Image: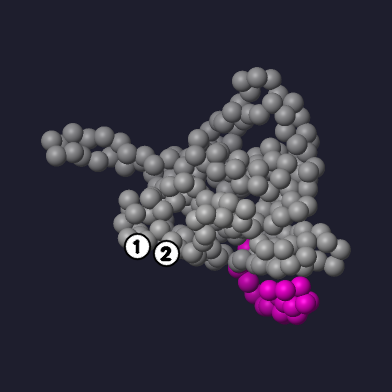
Amino acid sequence: MRKNTLNALLVAAGLLLTGPLVACTNFLVTKGASADGSTMITYAADSHVLYGELYFRPAADYPEGAMLDVYEWDTGKYLGKIKQVRHTYSVVGNINEHQVAIGETTYGGLPGLVDTTGIIDYGSLMYITLQRAKTAREAIRIMGELVAEYGYYSSGESFSISDPNEVWILEMIGKGSPQVVKDKRGRTRTVHNKGAVWVAMRIPDGYISGHANQARITTFPLNDPENCIYSPDVISFAREKGYFTGADQDFSFS
């Protein structure tokens, strides 16, 4: 929607917020849709069991081979260790020193796609990425690499990601926990599709978007890397699980 509708939308949003809500809500605003040419995202984590904190993570340097302990953001549960990078960027709240910002809303998805053995939950994914990314596109790449290497512990998430020039929505869901299967001879083996499938769409300049606990990305362009990035197995995984049987161009993420 064009910027001349932005004020009306914000007024409508204000009216909606006067009633009781249980949804995390994000607004995403591109450069061409703001009065001063700024990109911006809003992030309201509307949960009665989580209370707002302004986190500060200073920039730091680490020795070769350093490891990072990962704790689930919602509960503080220890999930495991991942490799630390040599240098991290300063992060205040949900924005870093390079003006990369990340927010989220949870859409849940199929419960069977949660990986209970994963090391990266959605909250850790946001704040670890903010310490490592200089642009929104780099943040998308890092988020995909982290869950591919260490497993994704959470359910389906819609992430808002912005830098001074671009605004993106990234939607992600896991591939499930390890399963023990038997072959025809009765022998057992463990099958584990570690990682996550995801799709990221750039919000066109001059437009705004929003999401509140509902996946937004449906069909998406398969050959437009300037505006759409996705995990290489997002369609093949859906076929493998029996979720999708049509032509690739008709695949819908949500």
Magenta extent? 1-24
Viewer-closest of 24 and 203: 203
- Residue type at the position of mark 1: Gly
| Residue 89 placement (x, y as % from top left) | 75, 36
Image disc number at residue 199? none
The 10 Å Cα crowd at callout 2, few under 14, some 14 to 19, many 20 or more, is few
Q: In the image, is 234 to the left or to the right of 6?
A: left
The 10 Å Cα crowd at callout 1, few under 14, some 14 to 19, many 20 or more, is few
The answer to whether mark 2 and mark 1 are in CB contact below 8 A is yes
Residue at the image position 43 percent from the left and 40 percent from the top = 194
**Residue 189: in sight, yes or no?**
yes
Q: In the image, is 244 to the left or to the right of 72?
A: left
Residue at the image position 40 percent from the left and 58 percent from the top = 248
Is 27 magenta? The answer is no
Q: Return the residue at label 2.
A: 250
Q: Return the residue at label 1.
A: 246
